[in-house]
């Protein structure tokens, strides 16, 4: 049961450090943020900055470029192609014009802004481009160069009418870590496995669980990687068009998809375009033979070393802008779409270029018009938003951070959370989704962080399910799955596997929590059209009472404090959902006891 | 002689640290810049951001406000007056509208932008305003609050047709540290004075030197503070409308002004609106009597302590937004203008508010239409530019820093300097002056930093005198005055007095350097109209060769390197000025030996 989750004598402050450290690995500390700001202030920078970010067919596009403190630009131009070729020296080009000078206090110097038009294109055009400057000394400098290779970045913009698929906008997503979800065929977990071992979950196990999932009410399954891989997590594939035998077969997957569809559920695969396993045959060929056709898929250094994901040698990094690597990835994605998959959760999506994703979405939509592309971009809001028009959305890591700060760590008060939330929603465009989550396979589970207090988990879920972005439930959260140990060990090591303990089934499930989640999901599915309204603050106490009005008639009350809160309900509103039976609505006054929450309307 | 300046075994890197540390006292290090950026990212911030920055009569103004990560704003408004009263609760108000949300990576949060119109005003109106927000909890928050008192900042905008006086735009300014310039009446320096003692310079000494200054060619004198003060520098006055007796009398000043005018020279006083001496009678009264009318001129803390300039207790800080303090300061300024003074160099001008300076310029221009207001704003370019319409310009500390980095410390190469310079000039508007200087009374002299190498000083001066901003010569630079010791002592203490050694007269002067300065000044005065042209890079070698074309026909060559440089001269150009007799212009090719420079055209 949830409340059996181990209690650990950790200070909240320690947990806060650990968790925020982890969530934004490359942007966690001031030092890292500064390094990123500095890096983006140097050189010739474009960062995919076009206006509009998602142009329609025939719409002209303005491209913005910045010459950093260290770059003199006598002229700046964009070379582009519309026929699929890589833009090169002989491509068509448009000149940009100097538009202003900006001061940068952090870099203590000036930057120069350049801008100009990209020609409007007919529907369906993928315009590939690169940005260049000529220095007064006659050198050519490319924009957004790779710090190691000096290679300028690839950009692309798709002139299409694609929008976020309607089903995705309304989805309730369930994240399944396949090895840890269900062994299948009634089989038991494999005994005596270490945390990073193979516990025995399979695709057949997922199929067996479909009635449970359907009964829960979720409408979309996100499967953790299922391609062949030497690891339990699978984020290092050795192939992209077969299934890891431990997990099942292609037939199993097709059967799972068909059965899921039968239950009204979609299926997303976890897709890693950034890196492969060092046992991937293409990598082995590339590594041992400089003349191998796959050599250019990777980045080898003069000393024979190679670029790898966060320098983890078992995960050599692909160059998805390499035509061969790109074709392999896109063909694999199309292969699975042809087998009925409904789209992809895209691992480390800020690794591959914007150009790759523009091409990827265009290619996948061509074979599966309503297929989904959701990126994992653990980055600033500006970087996340830059994927508009290239992806359907990005996992909402910023919300995760603030929501945990509000309801788990109590580092921010309701007013600060409300401020964050309203600005966060205002910052992102309507046609870009921010799927929300309370935890995932890479961090401490929410229930662990709140020391097993399911009242807090219910509060967080209540808040999550009133957001416009589709909610994601990490498997088992709904039945009280927690952990045996913190991810962060006293010796400084970190074991994300701690949050990947096996799913609980049957008697082991927290029935009360599960019943709450069922009601919550049902409520959301019936009310999803009402969640896009403006959010106005009704109550924000420093102690943790938070009430906001969504649109004109939906009241959300979250009481994190030690005292009851009272608030006037919207006229004619009824108690739609409460986390606690002691919540009362009487004579138009909603009374919410400590650690409880409710929706009225 | 200049080359007798003491050589010290200091590393350039050490000097670089010391100097940059000092020049930007509050913005010298990353840590300080970050602190400033963070401070400006919090709360409700306006920072005087209006468009246009210097509105003409009848021109509508847009005001921009930012609600920081920590401020929730339900509404934002501006209260204003046009009749001289302080804007208060009962003043007219205009509401601003939310215009956007911005992400701040450094603060890792969102800010909200608000904007709205200030009504256009007829000529001569001084519109005073303050900016407010109401939080959802019903609290009122003022913009740009004082971190200590919480008092919101005062702003003002003058709707006038004031522009930078033409004479100031064309001036060659000479900075006189009065106590160290000339004893007067042929008298000797006072013997055995410590560095911070009274050496005996007087206003009569300056009068005696007028023929020298006129012969040198300068057109404007800036006198260091001459009001009564307990210190040799005078930046802590005990009165604002009399003369320090050590330096002379009011009659002496009037005689000096008249004689200077007779020689075609203007006279600027150094004016400190930010703080006074702790011996100023107003401060003494305010300190000892809480009911004294001057009590509100200062900021006293509950424990009886008081706000002071950089916490130096002998310099209690004025609040120039206090009507009494403001009136005292403005009346004093007008008093001296009535006696013929041509304007002011305004010490620590970023201490007093924008509102004060708007009122100050309006009041001083009313009595002396062509009087000058030049601020010392040792701050970022953005902050300096915000004084457009309030001051005629700000001393060009950013140029100073880069020019020394280029020609003294050799920390940047010609391409980087040219990049800085062109962007710097583009960043500032045409009607805002950036007077240039190589050194002043608060830093190591340029000649000291280059270890007495007058060739380098000539190069720096050559570059300085081709800039559009009026050049300032710190007394004695033109005849080789240097120092006896670095400002920075090995024990970590800093003694700016090291750069205030007495002027050299007669045989002690470096005649060669002086002759060069005479030619340089004469050349500038004859060619000042040609210096606003665009600057294009002709040569930039990593070793230090730098040639740029100003406008269409003025070539500036600076050779900091160890090898000669050659460059084609503009057609028909002649050698206008050279720092070294070995410079050659033959067959249209300019040849510049190492450590030399020239102007062709």
Image: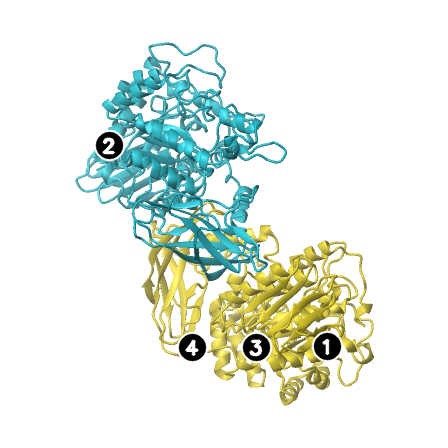
Chain colours: A yellow, B cyan
Q: Which residue is mark 3?
A: A530
- Give whichever of discs 1 and 3 has the lower sequence position: 1
Where is residue B326 shown, x and y percent of the image?
Answer: 43, 35
Mark 2 and mark 3 in contact? Answer it, CB < 8 Å.
no
Where is residue A122 shown, x and y percent of the image?
Answer: 36, 77
Q: In 3D space, how far apart are the residues under numbered discs 1 and 4 (Cα atoms)?
A: 41 Å
In the structure shown, which secondary structural element does the residue marked by tag 2 occupy?
helix
In this rendering, position of residue B255 left or right of residue B493: left
Q: In 3D space, how far apart are the residues under numbered discs 4 and 2 (Cα atoms)?
A: 61 Å
For the residues carrying marks 2 and 3, which lies nearer the camera in this image?
A: 3
In this rendering, position of residue A191 left or right of residue A375: right
Residue B466 visible in the current orientation:
yes
The numbered mark at residue B525 is 2
Residue B434 visible in the current orientation:
no
For the residues carrying marks 1 and 4, which lies nearer the camera in this image?
A: 1
Q: In 3D space, how far apart are the residues under numbered discs 1 and 3 (Cα atoms)?
A: 20 Å
In the structure shown, which secondary structural element does the residue marked by tag 3 occupy?
helix
Q: Chain of mark 4?
A: A
Where is residue B389 shown, x and y percent of the image?
Answer: 35, 44
In this rendering, position of residue A369 left or right of residue A199: left
The numbered mark at residue A160 is 4
Mark 1 and mark 2 in contact? Answer it, CB < 8 Å.
no
Task: Depth check: give the residue in front, B598 or A172.
Answer: A172
Q: Chain of mark 1?
A: A
Q: In 3D space, how far apart are the residues under numbered discs 2 and 3 (Cα atoms)?
A: 72 Å
């Amino acid at each position: 049961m949830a409340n059996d989750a181990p209690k650990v004598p950790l200070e909240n402050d320690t947990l806060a450090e650990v968790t925020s450290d982890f969530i934004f690995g490359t942007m966690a500390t001031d030092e890292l943020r500064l390094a990123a700001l500095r890096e983006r202030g140097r050189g010739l920078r474009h960062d995919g900055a076009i206006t509009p970010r998602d142009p329609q067919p025939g719409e002209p596009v303005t491209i913005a470029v910045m010459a950093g403190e260290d770059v003199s630009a006598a002229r700046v131009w964009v070379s582009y192609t519309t026929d699929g070729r890589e833009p090169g020296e002989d491509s068509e080009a448009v000149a940009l014009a100097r538009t202003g000078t900006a001061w940068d206090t952090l870099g203590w110097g000036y930057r120069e802004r350049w801008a100009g038009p990209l020609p409007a294109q007919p529907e369906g055009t993928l315009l590939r481009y690169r940005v260049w400057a000529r220095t007064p000394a006659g050198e050519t400098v490319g924009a957004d160069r790779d710090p190691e290779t000096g290679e300028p970045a690839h950009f692309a913009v798709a002139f299409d009418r694609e929008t976020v698929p309607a089903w995705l906008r309304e989805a309730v997503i369930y994240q399944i870590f396949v090895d840890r979800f269900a062994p299948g065929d009634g089989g038991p977990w494999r005994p005596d496995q270490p945390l990073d071992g193979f516990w025995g979950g399979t695709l057949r196990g997922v199929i067996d669980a479909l009635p449970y999932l359907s009964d829960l009410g979720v409408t979309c399954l996100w499967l953790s990687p299922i391609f062949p891989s030497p690891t339990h997590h699978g984020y290092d594939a050795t192939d992209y068009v077969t299934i890891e035998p431990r997990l099942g077969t292609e037939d199993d997957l097709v059967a799972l998809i068909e059965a899921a569809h039968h239950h009204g559920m979609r299926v997303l695969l976890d897709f890693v375009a950034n890196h492969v396993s060092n046992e991937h045959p293409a990598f082995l060929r590339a590594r041992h033979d400089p003349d191998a056709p796959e050599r250019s898929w990777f980045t080898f250094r003069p000393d024979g070393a190679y670029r790898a994901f966060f320098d983890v040698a078992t995960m050599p990094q692909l160059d998805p802008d390499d035509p061969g690597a790109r074709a392999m990835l896109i063909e694999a994605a199309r292969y699975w779409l042809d087998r009925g998959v409904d789209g992809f959760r895209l691992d480390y999506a800020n690794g591959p270029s914007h150009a790759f994703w523009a091409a990827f979405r265009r290619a996948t939509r061509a074979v599966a018009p309503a297929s989904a592309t959701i990126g994992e971009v653990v980055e600033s809001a500006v970087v996340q938003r830059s994927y508009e028009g290239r992806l359907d959305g990005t996992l909402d890591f910023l919300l995760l951070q603030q929501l945990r700060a509000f309801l788990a760590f109590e580092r921010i008060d309701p007013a600060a959370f409300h401020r964050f939330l309203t600005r966060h929603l205002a910052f992102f465009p309507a046609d870009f989704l921010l799927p929300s989550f309370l935890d995932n396979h890479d961090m401490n589970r929410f229930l662990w962080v709140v020391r097993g207090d399911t009242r807090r988990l219910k509060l967080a879920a209540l808040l999550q399910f009133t957001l416009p972005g589709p909610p994601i439930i990490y498997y088992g959260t709904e039945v009280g799955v927690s952990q045996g140990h913190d991810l962060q060990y006293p010796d400084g090591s970190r074991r994300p596997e701690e949050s990947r303990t096996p799913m609980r089934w049957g008697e082991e499930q927290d029935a009360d929590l599960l019943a709450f989640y069922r009601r919550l999901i049902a409520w959301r599915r019936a009310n999803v059209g009402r969640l896009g309204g403006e959010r106005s603050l009704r109550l924000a106490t420093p102690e943790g009472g938070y009430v906001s009005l969504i649109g004109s008639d939906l009241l959300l009350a979250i009481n994190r404090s030690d005292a009851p809160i009272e608030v006037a309900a919207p006229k004619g509103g009824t108690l739609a959902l409460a986390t606690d039976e002691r919540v009362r609505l009487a004579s138009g006054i909603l009374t919410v006891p400590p650690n409880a929450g409710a929706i009225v309307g």
